[in-house]
Image (cartoon, grey):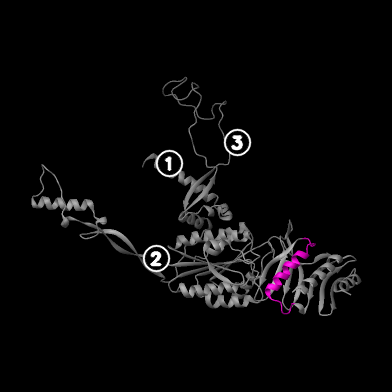
Amino acid sequence: MSLSSLLLDELRACAGQSGKSLFVRDGQRSVRCEAVHCERFAATVDELVLETPELAAATIAQLEAASRDLASRVNYLLEPVAPIESDAAGCTVQMRSNPPQKDDNGWRYYELVLRRGGSVALARYERQPGQPRVRVPAALTHEVIGRLVNDFELTAASV
Amino acid sequence: MLDIERDQRRFKEIVRGRIRGNLRKYITHGEMIGRKGRDIVSIPVPQLDVPRFKFGKNGSGGVGQGEGQVGDPIGKPGNDPGSGGGAGSDPGGGHFLEVEVSLDELAEMLGNELELPRIKPKGAASIEAEKTKYNSIRQTGPESLRHFRRTYLRALKRQISTGAYEIDEPRVIPVNADKLYRSWNDVPQPKVNAVVIYMMDVSGSMTDEQKEIVRTEAFWIDAWLGKQYRGIEKRYIIHDAAAKEVDEHTFYHTRESGGTRISSAYKAAAELIDQSFPVEDWNLYCFQFSDGDNWGDDNRKAFELLSEKLLPAVNLFCYGQVESPYGSGDFIDALEKQFDSHEKLVLSEIADKDAIYESIRTFLGKGK
């Protein structure tokens, strides 16, 4: 079974429950999902992380190329994502919603971080006017969570 | 004084009053920055009503016409129930009058508006600069500096004293010994040296809007410090994960995609001070702007440089955290925690353009 299928099975099994920390592994790759609340077809997720040693020796150029590839794949979230900053010293690429979503309640955006070591992580942030930004749960359908895991795996494999 | 001069002075007062009244708007929106000349700024002042004569219809009355005798008082406006008067209801075409104001004057207005204290230069950091002034006369010099009137006067004196001057045929002919030349002296002028080092984060998360805020704020800081110090030097450092010194244009128009390592800017500033601006001779000001999203463990390195190299050297270190659409990082909180009310460190959060006004007051309100 693929990582995405394993994770979705876990999520379905937790339907109706809150504060679940899910972890699935397939070979070298593993996925950690901090679910704030699980429903039958969707979940609010605090963080979704793919960890894999395939990114252990990645260079910053490879990570930047992988982030561009990931940005072109992940076109099904609320906002398009794009690489924003890359840090050569820490060998990390930060991607964010570009542009972020803006309404009367402030700004919201996804943040994806690719790290050598390595991992691909997704979280969502919110900033209300005059307030510091805070991490908020991202509401994702099971289908979207499955696609994200698949795309994270493809990105890791491409490095 | 001629009437026209008095009127002109009055007109200027009205214009300056209008600028003062709208200063907050100008500070916030930076409309005038693009209109900056060397020492003069051109400001668009809206709706300045210039008084003008208005002609009535021929034969419909006026001075010297109609009923009445010599000595009768002329009716006051509004006494006649049929007369018009009052303000017009037409809002006007929104005409703008371009008014030129010197940077010094603008800085003065800013100082008054924000109630900024005068800056006291650091210690005995005044340096005497020499200025050349043509204020004396010599008997030798280049022909281009020959003093025509004094030369002929001297020739006249010589001709009269020697009896060579003839009243019937008044001719003055200077000889070499009569020639006088303008000459100069070097006049020492007290001068206080000051340098402003601007540092800006140009990493991917700093958008053009944030840079515009920095540009506007820097313009006013420049204007104020320029008034306090003659011949102020400005240096610009940009950084993402690495820092470099750049010119003013590059400073405001560069966008990089690197991560944010604030320590790189501090290192570049410390090197610049070491190499070019001895602390004992210069009043040093640092203004740093970032969205505060510093990467990794860079805070520790940045704080080391700040406490060991920069804060001991500067008059004032100002950090402005500009909020981007992605929000603000925690650098300003970390700074506050680390340096807990350090006398030379001033922190300001700039949420948007409207916050520039208060931020300038925060930065320059210490009078250092």
Q: Which residue is mark 2?
A: B191
**Do the residues under discs 2 and 1 have CB atoms within 8 angstroms?**
no
**Residue A61, percent from left and from top:** 68, 72
The residue depicted at 49 percent of the width and 73 percent of the height is: B273
Given residues A90 and B79, the one toward you in this image is A90
Using residue A94 as the reference point, say whether residue B263 is left or right of it: left
Given residues B117 and A156, the one toward you in this image is A156
- Tell me the distance, in whole angstroms, between the alpha carbons under discs 2 and 1: 37 Å
Instruction: Tell me the SS state at disc 3.
Output: loop
Q: Chain of mark 1?
A: B
Q: Quadrant of residue A109?
A: bottom right
Residue A58, magenta (yes or no): yes
Q: Which mark is residue B235?
A: none
- Are the numbered discs 2 and 3 placed on the same chain, yes or no? yes
Q: Which residue is mark 1?
A: B7
Query: Hey, which residue is sitting farthest left in the picture?
Result: B163
Using residue B341 as the reference point, say whether residue A8 is left or right of it: right
Please give the range of residues in magenta: A55-78
What is the count of numbered marks? 3
Q: Which mark is residue B90?
A: 3
- Tell me the distance, in whole angstroms, between the alpha carbons under discs 2 and 3: 54 Å
Residue type at numbered disc 2 = Lys
